[in-house]
Image (tube, rainbow, N blue to C red):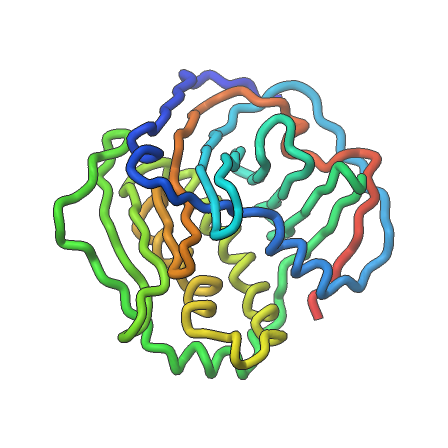
Amino acid sequence: MQKNDKPYQRVELKCCRARSQTVFKVSYGFIRAILVCMLAGSWLTVVHAAEGDVPATLVYFEESEPGVGSYQVRYVLNQTHLRIDDGEQSDGFVLFERETGTIYSVSHRNRSVLEVPPDKDAVPADILAREKQLSVRELVDKGEPPPAIGGKPVSLFSLGTASETCVSYSVAVGLLPDAVGMLKAYRQALAHNSRRKLINQPPEYLTDCMIINDVFAAKRYLGHGFPVMVRKHDGATRILAGYEISRDVNAALFQLPPTYRVIGVGLR
């Protein structure tokens, strides 16, 4: 296994946590909703073995949404994989495999893995037509900039239509570039699958902000830098709480449990 020869660095951003009392929970619900709606596979058994430690970047967010208490979500990533969980005692996790674009949602309670392969089909014409009708605007906050994070400047932006702000975000330019690259790949996979999910939305619920937040937002803010705060129009918020660079973690964190059943999922 690869040994870590880089100095271990931990950064806690107490200032970010203190500046906002509203935080956002990014759960596995979105991915599981996709899987349940599009379930069309069979039970399989997959074994992946791993031994030893590998260097990784760990990122911690404080997250919440209206009606849900705030708590911390952990992102563990290296060059090939991204794992999202609630920490060491998490009852499940999401694993993204960058090379294949596959997303796995693991449930320890059910001892199962839901697998979402990359969606390579063309985007539905009606969704593309709706997107082209949108007048998406990104505005830059010209006010006093927030304090730098990790020595990197922070800029404020908002994204929406001519009449409505759908999401506001703060990004640190140049912070955690490897993490930005991984998040771009992950969000691209989610956005493509989101477009298929939008087809099943009743017209009265398919709002401009829903399309902007599910399809456009992540690409925009990750294009500027690392997201230290994201606040959606419905009050959902995600705030960076800290990060650790070049920390040795168990390689098994990036593996599927060897005895869990895997549900293959079709995207149609």
Examine the rendered structure and indicate whether residue 58 appears above or below residue 192.
Answer: above
Residue 132 lies, in percent from the top left, at: 40, 80
Residue 165 lies, in percent from the top left, at: 31, 65
Between 168 and 82, the residue placed more toward the observer is 168
Residue 148 lies, in percent from the top left, at: 22, 34
Quick one: which residue is furthest to the front in this view?
67
Examine the rendered structure and indicate whether residue 164 appears above or below residue 10.
Answer: below
Q: Left of 205 or right of it: where is 264? A: right
Residue 92 lies, in percent from the top left, at: 68, 38
Q: Residue at x 42, y 60 (%)?
A: 234
Q: In which quadrant is the N terminus drawn?
A: top right
Q: Quadrant of residue 162?
A: bottom left
Q: Residue at x 32, y 67 (%)?
A: 160
Q: In which quadrant is the C terminus drawn?
A: bottom right
Q: Left of 149 or right of it: where is 53? A: right
Examine the rendered structure and indicate whether residue 151 appears above or below residue 237.
Answer: above
Q: Residue at x 45, y 51 (%)?
A: 184
Q: Left of 31 or right of it: where is 114? A: right
Q: Residue at x 52, y 80 (%)?
A: 204
Q: Left of 118 or right of it: where is 233? A: left
Between 110 and 243, the residue placed more toward the observer is 110
Q: How many marks?
A: 0
